[in-house]
Image (cartoon, grey):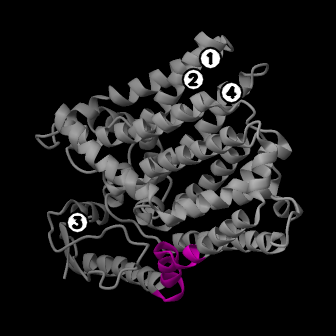
Amino acid sequence: MDALRSFLPWNNTLYTLQNALYLVLFVLFIAAIIPFFLLIFYAHPSADDFSYAAAYRTGGLWDHVVGEYLTWKGRYFAIFVTVLFHQSGDMIVNYKYPLLLFLTSLFFALYYLVRTVFEEKASFWQTLFCTLAFGAFYIITLPRVSAALYWADGAFQYQVGSIFFLLSVASLLRLYREVNNPFLPTLTSVLFIFAAIGSTEIFMISLSTLVGLIFLHKFFILKQNRLHWSVVLAVTVSSSALLILAPGNAIRMRLASENSQQFWFSVSRSIYHGGEALINWISHPTLWFLSIVFIPVALYLFYIKGIRKDASWTRLFLILALLIGQIWISFFATWWAAANPAPWRTLNVIYLVFLVGWFFLLLEFIAVMSKNRKLVYIDRLFSIPTRVMMLTSIILLSVLLISKSHVSDAYIDLFGGGAAAYDNFMKERYASIEQQKMNAGQESAAVIVEAIKNPPRILVYTDISRDKSDWRNSGYAKYFGLSSIVTK
């Protein structure tokens, strides 16, 4: 752990306490993440999982992929992953495996991005510390945890998209730096971009904007790797067209509200809701405490390792404009398409885009402010008042990690018995459905089951109701071969 302890040089008597608190924070990040992994083993299908399972478990894989693309939505990669899962075996038995894979992959993608941002000059422990910090903060401040981590259909689109979005940003950054050997980062960039854009429209907006700006800079100003950036741009544009121009999108749009595709209505609503979300995210105290804790890490890498020597005010303001613009466009897209506020699953991915942009902005700001002022800022950074402020931030961040509702709720679900009780309840529900089907004989059974009375705080996304015509109930009925199903 020496590398982790060497964030700051020995400068004053607060050094030992500060590094001890960094180690405590490192452990707390791990402790904050663990329950979210463990809760996956208690997850069960919900929402439209049953509908897709009933539709996809038989028939040809590509027939379903093409059919869904032509008749419902253009998210080609998400469709492929969803169909592949439902044709791989029993959904209920296998449900936890993709969720576990996706959450694990998210942290690997974060590690790859952090390592790339630090130009591979940070130690393993420093990179891991920042990865855990970002990942833990993202999870514990998610707008809706269950929609991101414990609902398979949402994960197939948004969690998979998040993974490939992070990988895409890292690969684009590597390609931007790699002037002499650009083949490998070009290849990974186009593959990751194709998958990310094919998962959800939000990442299409983010990556198209990012690739377009970098292409203009590289092609016309720097005149570097023109062929490689042209290939990346071509794949980005082609992937976006494949997503947007899907025939299924037009069919789906006919079911939208009458206010959908109304420009000024969408502009006004997106400004209001996007601004409200941005204010809420920026004003979150945990974000600022984490940002302050990140400062010594960044300065260590600037001064000791020599990264980000090309930082500039121009790039700083460009990142800021890009961040605000992408958030607004993302909210605009949701209002344009559906004339409704962004659902939880969409808010989760917009929030991820915000966090990535925020820490790029923070890194650039620190680099610009400290550029060519090494002695001044080193002295200020390691002064007693500054050290006290950082110690306070570390302590407050540690307290928030322990007391933050998502973390405390996750531990309550695990050790308070809520998750286990929910798991047993759902298994009993499945058994009750099968028993009622057997009792009905050859007839298609109309089944009545118990409602979830005390759902876990984190784990459950949504459930069936007393209304047999509810789309959730209809999906359940199709999956189990029932005429109808309702709760008592």
Above or below, comparing residue 68 to residue 471 in the picture = above
Of discs 2 and 3, which sits in the foreground? Answer: 2
Residue 112 position, x and y percent, is 69, 45
- Residue 12's quadrant in the figure? bottom right
Report how far apart the C-alphas of labels 1 and 4 lie in the structure: 11 Å
Above or below, comparing residue 258 to residue 90 in the picture = above
In the drawing, does residue 326 fall left or right of residue 374? left
- Amino acid, disc 4: Leu
Per the image, label 1 sits on a secondary structure element best described as helix
Residue 175: numbered disc: 4
Report how far apart the C-alphas of labels 1 and 2 lie in the structure: 6 Å
The quadrant of the rendering that contains the C terminus is: bottom left
Total count of labels: 4
Nearer the observer, 381 or 332: 381
Residue drawn at x 50%, y 77% is 410
Find the magenta span and give its range.
399-417
Residue denoted by label 3: 473
Q: Is residue 113 magenta?
A: no
